[in-house]
Image (cartoon, rainbow, N blue to C red):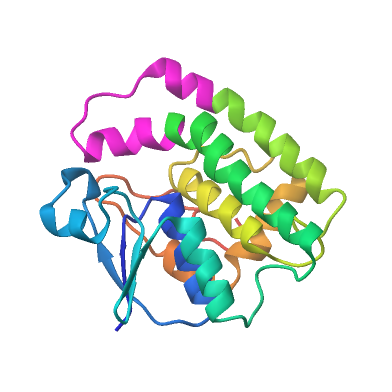
Amino acid sequence: MNRLYHFPLSPFCRKVRLTLAEKRIEVELVEERYWEQSPDFLRRNPAGKVPVLRMDTRVMSESQAICEYLEEAYPAPALMPRDPDSRYEVRRLCNWFDDKFHSEVTSKLLYERVNKKVMAAGYPDSKNVKSGANRIKYHLDYMAWLLDQRRWLAGDTMTLADFAAAAHLSCLDYISDVDWNRHAVVKDWYVKLKSRPSFRALLADQVPGFPPPGHYADLDF
């Protein structure tokens, strides 16, 4: 059995989970308290981060590397375009969300509100929360600009770029930190994604002490 070591509200784990589900690859989910840095987990990934995917005898880490491996090893359905320019755009946007968005928004909102409590690492820093709440507006505006020109974030077909963005936003939506009324085009894009079968497991996630809002699993908000 394939096994994914993950944390439910990790956007990087969610991106891999969406990719696995979209490609209909069965996997056993093992929740990992990665911050405890257990010797067993460090043997799987010396970097001490999730996700870690075990397939047969291969153990893989780093979400983008895992997703691109899955795309090459299981090419259908395709989540990367075939031409170099379009593939570049997908990779650029994956990095945008996993780097810039993560640094400016996810780490300031999700990690302050949830991760610190789960990890017993103190109380939220109000300055970080305020900064994240301000910066997410810029990112939603940028997404709206992209979606005004394209059917999906990177072009006319759904790609890993959409999964990267949706992974971060779904985590933030779990704690009601996304203003879906800011841009109808972004809300419509997210509705299309959360309505897919591959999204169902994410919408069923529960983190003890942090119940999701009523709209979280509602496909029509």
> Residue 200's x, y, as percent?
48, 70
Q: Residue at x 23, y 40 (%)?
A: 118
**Majority SS type along the magenta span:** helix
Split into 4 quadrants, where in the image is the C terminus? bottom right
On screen, 57 above or below 169?
Answer: below
Q: Residue at x 45, y 29 (%)?
A: 108
Let me know if residue 145 is in the magenta part.
no
Locate the N terminus and report the quarter of the image it occupies. bottom left
Give percent across and percent down for residue 90.
69, 56
Instruction: Report how many numbered discs are placed on residues in the image.
Output: 0
Q: Position of residue 170 (x, y in %)?
A: 51, 51
Chain part drawn in magenta = 109-132
- Could you say which is closer to the camera, residue 157 or residue 64? 64
> In this picture, is 48 found above or below 44?
above
Question: Which residue, as the protein is rendered here, is positioned at the far top?
Answer: 127
Work out whether residue 143 or residue 43 is closer to the camera in this orientation and state it.
43
Left or right, 32 with reference to 69:
left
Residue 114 located left or right of residue 135: left
Instruction: Name the residue: 66% across, 76% down.
Output: 78
31 in relation to 74, above or below: above
Residue furthest out toward the left: 39
- Please say whether residue 158 is visible from this viewpoint: yes
Residue 65: horizontal and vertical position, in percent? 49, 60
Q: Inspect this view and state whether residue 183 appears.
A: no
In the rendered image, the vertical position of residue 21 relative to residue 119, given as above or below:
below
The residue drawn where x is 35% and y is 19% is 125
